[in-house]
Image: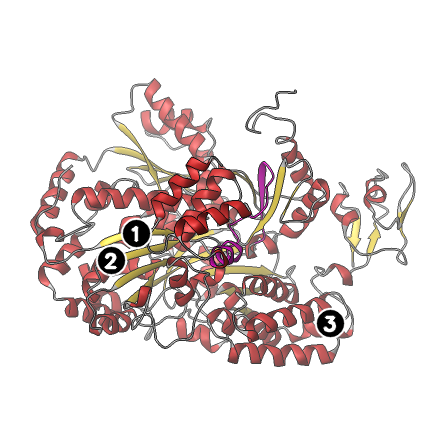
């Protein structure tokens, strides 16, 4: 492998690689990260074996890539040239793909994506509605390159922006370019990245740190994981540019230990950078040195908060502290420390390469560029979606996401996870950006976008998030430690049918206090799900309290269980499972539930093989 | 854990800034959990007060202070799994295994845990047993999967010699 000594070396190396590589060569890009959960590795092995059997392994390349985004079609693969998209792959499909597509140049109809409305088959990946509405900037290499090959990244223009910044720009010019682009922090709060870098650049210190926050803890969000797994060098190039801009010579990537593939790919990437001379002393012969370490988190949601994250890197309990001093002034071991999120850093190289005007031309007035969302919940096309800022929720849910499955009706979307809020139907046409979401009481958050349909109970969701924040509260400050616990108890009373109007008033009061007085972002935002569900779905809370009813039939204590006589097959399973002996009837008899004895545990409904237990 | 393995870990991290968490992670990877004795040795070895070692070990959910079941079942209770019915799958597992989440089974064959998100929302509700994912779980499907790990089934790692 080469070792870059000057600015020109990267460009020369890229030229050499591109000459060696035949861009028209046939290749199949198999997702080997998220799709592994559905057996992508077995498919890939089977494909390689089939090609080898026919002596085609040299002419036809299997590229094991990161996430393609269309997770509900998992495992997926794309054949090039032709951009043919195959989904729901099984190892036994490999033979047919090789025979038909590789050898005969035909498509395998049954593996193509079918439009759910018309059943029409769509051949090309880019023409599937899920992809055609997206703008893939951060995800441009995800699902395309082999994330374990730095050469793949360099071939596609990688490290050109870093080389350009180092050769032609002063650190302050890099800062101004990022500031002008309008890039805002993608971790959730949306602070202008350029401004943060300017503060860091101005700090006078002989030691500064740059930290990449990859502690993606929001349940239901997997954007950062996909970027780190599928295109680690995009983040690392962003870090090199950032370090140069602020004058840092050492960096950390703080990544969740729950992301083993991301950690493995980062380790490979760092080793390759060291070999090529992209890390270490006097990089590319310039007066710029940078060392980078990976720090694995140990399982604490609060460590996504920047002061807690730094405490964790220092080997302490990950509890936040009062700011100021801000990390930029006094961070890791007392040195100025700039902390940026994964997706923020993944935007940087493209801005330096194409200029701030190009970037600022995308998005809305105050939110530029794109945002990656992890679309999940009651939605047809679960997956990773990159949308230009300002796209409406309706477009994301119904065009990209394919709408709500099973003929159900949309009820609300949740953004920002446990810190966010719910957005009801009346705001479906809201152009999504930082400010419009804040206006309706939600937040952009890191990008989790969970869709709820009419079968979801909002009180149950509020209780769910409160359970999460209450158990993840670090316990340092009183409002968060006590407040989340009390709010959870109040929500439990309401979902158990014991709630009163006084409880509701107390819940609202507590929510306001916790929001206003907590030490860090975890506590300050923890009441958001309660506040927004109360704002938009107050009726549902009232139904739980006044009528002791759960309109969505989710809160067990408020349901009545009965046996539907026409569906009961007299198997006796419900009676066997009942802990209260409330079900009468022997085998070969229609069973009956004694409402006086029923403890509403829901076991009979769970075990009945014939769906004969009805809820009302 | 053999004393030499622990000594090696301590030697590797002694005097390095921010080394307590990685040292605990490596020690746990060696022996499965962190006993009081292990914590004491790390405290002495790294020259960090025991109170701080204990504080860190109990703060992070990844560290275990008691022995664990052989197969770890992680039931995802992330938002996407929650709205698609993770609660019912968890309840069924708790009843089948006779333990509440967070505990090992009596025979130490299983460890039942919940996680906030496995990041596999397209499999919702998802569970993970050791390194394998199982998607779209219902109370009916979890029982079948457990059987694979009981009495040294095909995917259950080392077969039981008694069988």
What chain does badge 2 belong to?
A
Q: Determine which residue is flagged by label 3.
A: A543
Residue A55 shown left or right of residue A3 in the figure = right
Residues under numbered marks 3 and 2 in contact, where contact means CB atoms less than 8 Å apart? no
Q: Are marks 3 and 2 on the same chain?
A: yes
Mark nearest the camera among 3 and 2 is 2
Residue B122 shown left or right of residue A159 in the figure = right
Q: Residue at x 80, y 56 (%)?
A: A600
As drawn, the label of residue A250 is 2
Q: Are marks 3 and 1 on the same chain?
A: yes
Neighbour tally class for label 1: few under 14, some 14-19, many 20 plus, Cα within 10 Å:
some
Residue B152 is situated, as x and y percent measured from the top left of the image, at 61, 26
Q: Are marks 2 and 1 on the same chain?
A: yes
Question: Element at badge 2?
Answer: strand
Q: Determine which residue is flagged by label 1.
A: A293
Residue A333 is situated, as x and y percent measured from the top left of the image, at 32, 64
The residue range painted magenta reads B52-77
Residue A505 is situated, as x and y percent measured from the top left of the image, at 67, 81
Question: Element at badge 3?
Answer: helix
Picture quadrant of residue A153: top left
Nearer-the-camera pick, A88 or B74: B74
Nearer-the-camera pick, A350 or B48: B48
Residues under numbered marks 2 and 1 in contact, where contact means CB atoms less than 8 Å apart? yes
């Amino acid at each position: 492998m080469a070792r870059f000594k000057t600015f020109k070396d990267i460009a020369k190396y890229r030229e050499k690689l591109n000459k060696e590589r035949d861009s028209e060569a046939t290749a199949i890009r198999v997702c080997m990260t998220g799709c592994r959960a559905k057996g992508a590795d077995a498919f890939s092995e089977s494909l390689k074996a089939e090609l080898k059997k026919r002596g085609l392994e040299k002419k036809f390349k299997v590229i094991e890539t990161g996430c393609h985004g269309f997770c509900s079609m998992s495992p997926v693969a794309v054949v090039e040239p032709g951009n043919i998209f195959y989904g729901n792959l099984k190892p036994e499909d490999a033979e047919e793909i090789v025979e038909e597509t590789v050898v005969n140049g035909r498509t395998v109809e049954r593996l193509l994506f079918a439009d759910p409305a018309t059943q029409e088959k769509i051949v090309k990946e880019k023409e599937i509605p899920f992809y055609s509405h997206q703008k893939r900037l951060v995800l441009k290499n995800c699902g395309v390159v082999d994330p374990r090959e730095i050469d793949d990244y360099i071939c596609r223009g990688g490290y050109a922006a870093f080389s350009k910044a180092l050769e032609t720009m002063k650190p302050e010019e890099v800062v101004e370019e990022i500031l002008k682009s309008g890039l805002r922090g993608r971790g959730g709060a949306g602070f202008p990245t350029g401004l943060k870098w300017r503060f860091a650049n101005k700090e006078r210190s002989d030691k500064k740190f740059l930290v990449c926050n990859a502690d993606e803890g929001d349940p239901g969000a997997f954007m950062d994981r996909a970027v780190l797994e599928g295109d680690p060098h995009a983040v690392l190039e962003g870090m090199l540019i950032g370090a140069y801009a602020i004058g840092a010579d050492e960096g950390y990537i703080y990544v969740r230990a729950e992301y083993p593939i991301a950690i493995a790919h980062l380790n490979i990437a760092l080793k390759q950078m060291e070999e090529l001379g992209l890390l270490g002393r006097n990089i590319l012969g310039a007066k710029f040195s940078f060392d980078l370490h990976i720090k694995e988190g140990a399982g604490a949601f609060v460590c996504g908060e920047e002061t807690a994250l730094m405490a964790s890197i220092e080997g302490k309990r990950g509890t936040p502290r009062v700011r100021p001093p801000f990390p930029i002034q006094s961070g890791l071991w007392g040195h100025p420390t700039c902390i940026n999120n994964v997706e923020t850093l993944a935007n940087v190289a493209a801005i330096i390469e194409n200029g701030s005007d190009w970037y600022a031309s995308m998005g809305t007035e105050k939110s530029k560029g794109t945002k990656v969302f992890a679309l999940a919940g009651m939605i047809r096309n679960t997956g990773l979606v990159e949308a230009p800022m300002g796209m409406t929720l309706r477009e994301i849910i119904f065009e990209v996401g394919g709408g709500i499955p099973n003929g159900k009706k949309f009820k609300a979307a949740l953004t920002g996870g446990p810190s966010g809020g719910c957005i009801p139907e009346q705001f479906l046409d809201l152009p999504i950006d930082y400010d419009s979401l804040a206006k309706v009481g939600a937040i952009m958050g890191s990008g989790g976008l969970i869709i709820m349909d009419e079968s979801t109970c909002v009180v149950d969701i509020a209780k769910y998030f409160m359970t999460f924040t209450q158990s993840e509260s670090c316990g340092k400050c009183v409002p968060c430690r006590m407040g989340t616990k009390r709010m959870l108890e109040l929500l439990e009373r309401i979902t158990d049918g014991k709630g009163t109007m006084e409880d509701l008033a107390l819940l609202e009061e507590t929510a306001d206090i916790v929001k206003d007085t907590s030490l860090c972002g975890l506590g300050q935002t923890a009441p958001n799900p309660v506040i927004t569900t109360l704002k938009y779905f107050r009726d549902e809370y009232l139904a739980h309290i006044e009528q002791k009813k759960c309109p969505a039939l989710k809160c067990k204590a408020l349901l009545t269980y009965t046996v539907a006589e026409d569906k009961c097959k007299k198997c006796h399973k419900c009676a066997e499972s009942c802990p209260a002996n409330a079900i009468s009837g022997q085998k070969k008899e229609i069973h009956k539930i004694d409402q006086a004895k029923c403890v509403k545990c829901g076991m009979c409904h769970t075990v009945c093989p014939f769906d004969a237990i009805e809820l009302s | 854990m053999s004393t030499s393995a622990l000594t090696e870990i301590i030697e590797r991290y002694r005097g390095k800034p921010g080394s307590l968490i990685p040292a605990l992670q490596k020690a746990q990877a060696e022996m499965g959990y962190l006993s009081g004795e292990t914590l004491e040795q790390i405290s002495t070895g790294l020259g960090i007060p025991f109170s701080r070692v204990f504080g860190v070990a109990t703060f992070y959910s990844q560290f275990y202070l008691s022995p664990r079941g052989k197969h770890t079942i992680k039931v995802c209770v992330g938002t996407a799994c929650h709205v698609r019915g993770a609660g019912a799958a968890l309840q069924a597992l708790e009843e089948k295994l006779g333990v509440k989440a967070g505990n090992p089974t009596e025979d130490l064959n299983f460890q039942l845990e919940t996680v906030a998100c496995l990041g596999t929302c397209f499999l919702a509700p998802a569970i993970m047993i050791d390194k394998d994912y199982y998607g779209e779980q219902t109370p009916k499907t979890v029982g079948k999967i457990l059987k694979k790990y009981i009495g040294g089934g095909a995917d259950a790692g080392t077969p039981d010699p008694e069988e």
